[in-house]
Amino acid sequence: MDRIKYSPYLDIVQTPEKAALNIKNKHVVGVSGFTKAGDSKTVLPIVAKRALHEDLKITVLSGASLGYDTDADLAKNGALYKRMPFQADPTLRKAINNHEVLYVDQHLGQTADMLQNIDTFKIDIAIIEAVGITKEGYIIPTTSVGNSPIFAEKADKIIIEVNRSFPESLAGLHDVKILKKQPNREVIPVLDAYTRIGDPYIKIDPKKVVAIVYTEVPDSPAVISAPDEKTKAISNHILRFLEQEVEEGRLTESLLPLQAGIGKTANAILSGFKDSKFKNLTMYSEVLQDSTFELIDAGKLLFASASSITVTESCSNKVFGNFDQYKDKLILRPQNISNAAEVISRLGVIGINTAIEFDIYGNVNSTHITGTKMMNGIGGSGDFARNGYLSIFACPSISKEGRISHIVPMVSHTDHTEHDVDILVTEQGLADIRGLAPIERALLIIQNCVHPDYKEQLLDYFTEAYKLGGHTPHILNKALSWHTLLQSNGTMKIEELEVHQA
């Protein structure tokens, strides 16, 4: 009980099963958690089990994806009516694409603003994970801040899960500030990655708290594959590009604050900085992955600001087993500050994110397979692409044994327009499309980024389109033909189809 410094809460310590009864059919539930970190590990999973034998269907809002099988169990048990603003679970993804669950894919920096600006969007109950509770009854978060502050502010009731698997030394890691409602919002005075502007806890009204639950379940570990030849090549192309920017005087060896998305490619790109010429680096990002701590250990990274810490089990054991050696180099913030356009622009963040596909003119699809099936969501990539100093998007040139090219004539769904993209990179090479007209972009992307198996095929498309004229030349009845070929024949390669037909 020593983690609860506010004695009135001791009277409402409950089992997870009893606490979960506060959640009713049609409730809107705001849950802590950002990319598997700091999420509800006891109460929400019990709600999923209840849905097997109750008429219980809820709307769940979070910071980003939840850990373990929580999203999967909610979906397969029929407990979800609507989910937002991000997910990364295969079972939930299938339910979304089968129209069994409504899904709102949203820029992660905008959820809090939506909740503030739309008065009719109510939060019935918030479930927030804590490492401890202050003497005032305030919440000290665990490994994420995400949208927890706005959920706690807007919710009619609050359940707190006190997680004793994390060291109490996490206290002081967080920097929490609730921004004023738009318009006429105050300036966000973050001047560098390590600026603090708020409190090390989430202020709440203790009268809202209806249950305290104890848990000792650690975060669901991230699963990140080791860098392979493709991701190493992508990382090397980006490092060489940044080295050239330094040589030409546009950047220094400390660069500017770095942001990177989640997953194998992003982690591999950041890991590449460990053996680079760069030094005294900083991060202003959303998620801190294994590579963040590799760079700190290597003496390359001075400070990292984000909204969550999402790491593998081995990295988690190292970091939280020796947290005092990392604590003074980290800050976790609410995601509407980690992803704030104002701050990203002021600091000049270099954004590095991944794509599903991009086209010859620089438009990027981050979310939809063949234009219709949701993968995960846009996450925070748009927040950084639209507002950073440099917007870099990376992906492999091909996949599925070469049957799919990730550079196509026209993307099947557009998340980031050509206006918000500066650099495109695959393992084949890098295209710096800043200041280029569409026709110039197309030739550079085809030359530098496309796999040899598809280069001639894509150049043929562009050549034919160019003859038709137009500022951004396209052949409308062929622009998405690569995607329709894939759906009908299992490959985007025209030559393979011709051989097969012959």
Image: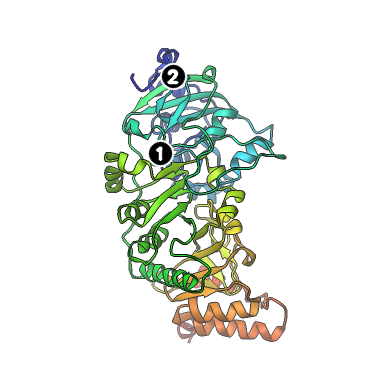
Q: Secondary structure at mark 2?
A: loop
Q: What is the x, y in percent for residue 29? A: 54, 32
Mark sitting on residue 47: none
Disc 2: CA contacts within 10 A as few (<14), some (14-19) or many (>=20): few
Instruction: Give the image quarter of residue 317.
Output: top left
Q: Nearer the viewer, residue 438 or 246?
A: 246
Q: What is the x, y in percent for residue 45? A: 41, 33
Q: Nearer the viewer, residue 104 or 198?
A: 198
| Quadrant of the image containing the N terminus | top left
The residue that disc 1 covers is 143
477 left or right of 37 in image: right
Q: Secondary structure at mark 1?
A: loop
The figure's colour scheme reads: rainbow
Label pair 1/2, CB-CB below 8 angstroms: no
Can you tell which of label 1 and label 2 is closer to the viewer? 2
Q: What is the x, y in percent for residue 367? A: 54, 57
The residue that disc 2 covers is 135
Residue 101 in view here: no
- Going 49% across and 79% down the picture, which residue do you hit? 448
Disc 1: CA contacts within 10 A as few (<14), some (14-19) or many (>=20): many
Instruction: Give the image quarter of residue 415.
Output: bottom right
Q: Hey, what amino acid is under mark 2?
A: Lys
Q: Hey, what amino acid is under mark 1?
A: Thr
Q: What is the x, y in percent for residue 101? A: 55, 43
Q: How many marks?
A: 2
**CA separation in Å, label 1 and label 2:** 21 Å
**18 above or below 49?**
above
- Going 47% across and 43% down the picture, which residue do you hit? 307
**311 above or below 207?**
below
